[in-house]
Image: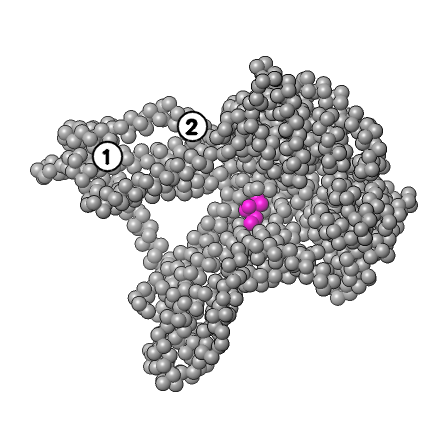
Amino acid sequence: MKQRWITFTLAGAIALTAIGGLAACAPEGGGGGGGVDANTIQIWGPGHETSFIESRLNAYVQAWEAEHPGEKYPYKLVQANAGEDDAENKFNVDATACGDVYHFASNQLMSLMEAGGLARISPDMETRIKTEDMEAVVEACKIGDGYYAYPYTSDNGYCLFYDSDVVTITEETTVMDVIEQCKAAKKQFIMPMKDAYYAASFIYGAGATYQATYNNSGKFLSSKNTFAEKPAGSEYSYGELGGKMLADLFELSNSSAKGYTATVIAGGNTEVETALNTEKFGAAVTGSWEAASIAYATVNGEPLKAAACALPDWVSTLDGNTYHWRAFMGYKMIGVNPHSSHLAEAHRIAAFLTSEESQLAHFNEWYVGPSNKKVAESDEVLNSEYSFSFKAMNEQREKCSLPQKPCPQDYWNNVGSFAEWLMDYNANISDPKTPAADKKDLKTRVEQLAKALTQN
Amino acid sequence: MKDIPPIITGGQIALIVFLSVIALALAVVALLLFVGLVRRRSFREATELEILTMGPLQKFGYRAKRFLFRVPDGAYTLVAVHIPALAKRAWKGICGIFTTLKDALVHGDWKTRCSFAVMGFSYFARKRFARGLLFFALEVFYILYMVLFGGNQLFRFFTMTEGNVVGREEFWNEDIGNWDYRYHDNSLLILIYGTLTLIFTVAFLYGWYKNIKAAYYAQELEEARRHIPTAKEDIHNLVDAQYHKTLLAVPLAGLMVFTIFPIIFMIFLAFTNYDAMHTPDVSNLFTWVGAQNFFTIFTGGIGSGNTQFGRVFGTLLLWTVVWAVFATFTNYILGMLVAIIINKKGIRLKKLWRTVLVMTIAVPQFVSLLLMSQMFGDNGFINTVFGTRIGFLTDHSLLPKVMVILINIWVGIPHTMLMVSGILMNIPADLYESAKIDGAGPVKQYMKITLPYILHVTTPSLITTFIGNLNNFGVIYLLTGGGPLMQEAGSGGAGETDLLITWLYKLVFSYNEYAMASVVSILMFILTAVVSLIAYNRSKAVKNEEDFM
């Protein structure tokens, strides 16, 4: 009998522990307006900018305490790493568990709105951003009649970064010229060819368009595109022209026979960093986030002669015509979570992080183009030796860019699959051993892509 | 979009296909029954002596024939014996409930009959207040719950977003000087509370049935002039004769809260349109869509984002099974071989070899896998050193699939080796000695002594490993991330080396396709449950439990 009571007590103890464990599972931090510490405000930002954001938050607290002598700042500001590209996924899973203030890329505006992740900014702030920030960026923050995000950067896109000792750019330079120059110098040309963000750039360069429409609450309504349509007088569609160019690049990146081994690299940030570290960097299609790394790199103990320009033109191997190379051009913004328990304070923090002072500090630390007009036009920015990235992005925007509108997830999936399909396209069609039935048909595949990207 | 058939047509086609599949399945069952009945009579089992006198070819022929005849035999037993027996038991159970209720109503006295309306009345009337109070409290609690909260929840659970449903409301809040938000309806909460209310209702009905059964039992005891247990006796009973129930109460409650409830909730989710475009609480709230998601998967229909879920599911299911078979058996066979080689007499430095292999276990598996992933990457160590451009993990050929199986062998063999080594050391040496005296060679010894011994002990672990491999998230996620992406349009971001489980992860965390993810997880559950139940019940470890003991 005694043993039974011991067992019974043990069972009870286990149950109590389980309940205790459950209590401990409550989310920590102020995200979603709940948590252990009611005064916590969570700020989500990209991992590589952790120390920068922390310094800005410290500056904010100091400014507050200077304004309120004798008082201590009442909130606990907690920082967490969450990439700007990942915000929509996190909010779609559970908006109540997300940060109070967070960084995100402009293409996610609508899906974040749909997920209930964007709080509308006040009329005062509306006036501020309209006066101080670039019109295009401010317009990108607008949904219906309201503004739902704070403009932060103006150059979230890509252009050509290069070592001017290796590559010389003129108006006539094409992408193949750049690659040849890299090959001659035994350096690398790097581009994230499989990444859907970059993969369709040749198709848009050939003249194709894609449009997704949303209603004012962020709900995706429809999408249409002209990928399978032909430019006037051409026998090839935009998708075929752009797709073939990408396939040509893939062929060079796969090829070891033509002496291109390790010249053309299908890769992203990691490959750019590796190339910089191993002194193999020739040129790369990348964004302002790599500007600092490229600017600080060295070759043979000397600083690398970092330069950047708009993406060069390309010559189609299908029709022999020259086309521009169009880049996505978006922005970075800071949003406030409507589920925050401290909505007003979260807005104040977001406003501070995107203020003129913070944007200048951001440029000085990361060389990222500001959206604030005063900062962008300041001598400090324009005369900075690191403004090459910012200037190249402006050049790209003026020459040939595609304002990055929100796209539904299936856009990225389908373009990604198309890029994967193109990887061995050239090898497949040129191999005499491939049976006719197994030959890849670019025209049909482009039509399939166009159909998959169309929704009513 | 006009080329893509609207979903309603897909649903109708799906229904026809679904009914055809059922008809086909019934036809197959009938055929199996017929073949089973006929063949059972036409095949005669050979005796031990007859088998011994057969030549090797003859023996092989006999075994192949017996195998073929036993397949419909097994199916016959399943269809004609096991399933009807199960159905009969279930039917009997259901009938039993109604028989009890009928008996209580027809033969019960007024005290028992009153218990139909007022729970615990019979016990109050028979002066057993504690038990009566418990039943009555249950009734009061349920009625109060339903009136104050549950009834509304249950109504909304069934109607979901019909009527005037408002998600989120934006308003100007003067107090904070900012736009603020009020939240009203929330599909997810409606689903959760509705599910809870349903569970409470089932539990209440069970309590009500137990109340009537207990009332009638008390009446029978009274009529037989036997003693009706008092509260004190009841409690004593709970720590004595019914002690198992007391002990199981806590784990059962845990199981209900942490396992059964989420599973029921997940099953309901599969019948909604919860995805990135239908949120729980903002606007365009998600609602019921019937079995549309299942039709989409089974008929190759097109889901949200023009994704061809049926094609992707079929492709990934095939690869998942192929992967599980290869990952399990390559590790098992090769691990066993390594163990046997190391265990062999005459092999030197046994401890060293074992230690070397065990060292790979000491390195956390995810570290090994991430290292391998880096090494075999497009711009990884191997390609850089050899100056090659081989897409070990990214090529659109069989290569990435072969690579993940090979790398899995690398990380998996030491585990099997360790397990089998232990078993090998436990096989009595005299078995081998007597076999040798009888003239058995090494192969014969292996086939007749070592293998049966190892198989008997390791079959349950083999099944667990197989099931584990069906759901082996870590290896695939860390090595290839499911990549490379499928090349076909409408693949919804699925990769060529994705297992169903890694696709499920992507569906939830990258593409927010919650409803489809629920469908996939239900199908995966059915797959793993069926495989594990059949394999485990047919294993020798279960059938001949006494052997080798």
Q: Amino acid at mark 2?
A: Gln
Q: Nearer the viewer, residue B384 or B62?
A: B384
Was residue A264 drawn as part of the magenta stretch in this picture?
no
Image quadrant for the C terminus of chain B?
A: bottom left
Pointers 2 and 1 within a single chain: yes
User: Does residue B500 appear in the picture of this structure?
Assistant: no
Q: Quadrant of residue B149?
A: top left
Q: Which mark is residue B211?
A: 1
Image quadrant for the N terminus of chain B?
A: top right
Q: Residue at x 37, y 70 (%)?
A: B426
Mark 1: give few (<14), some (14-19) or many (20+) Cα within 10 Å: many
x and y percentages locating residue A127 in the rendered image: 72, 18
Determine the residue located farthest toward the left in the rendered image. Answer: B225
x and y percentages locating residue A132 in the rendered image: 76, 22
The subunit letter for the residue under badge 2 reads B
Residue beneath disc 2: B153
Determine the residue located farthest toward the top in the rendered image. Answer: B174
Rendered image coloring scheme? one colour
Q: Decide: is B193 above or below B100.
A: above
Mark 2 or 1, nearer chain start: 2
Q: Quadrant of residue A211?
A: top right
Was residue B505 drawn as part of the magenta stretch in this picture?
yes
Q: Decide: is A329 above or below A443.
A: above
Question: Which residues fall within the magenta stretch?
Answer: B502-507
Q: Nearer the viewer, residue B141 or B43?
A: B141
Mark 2: give few (<14), some (14-19) or many (20+) Cα within 10 Å: many
Q: Residue at x 30, y 42 (%)?
A: A11
Q: Residue at x 31, y 33 (%)?
A: B204
x and y percentages locating residue B44 in the rendered image: 35, 74
**SS for callout 2:** helix
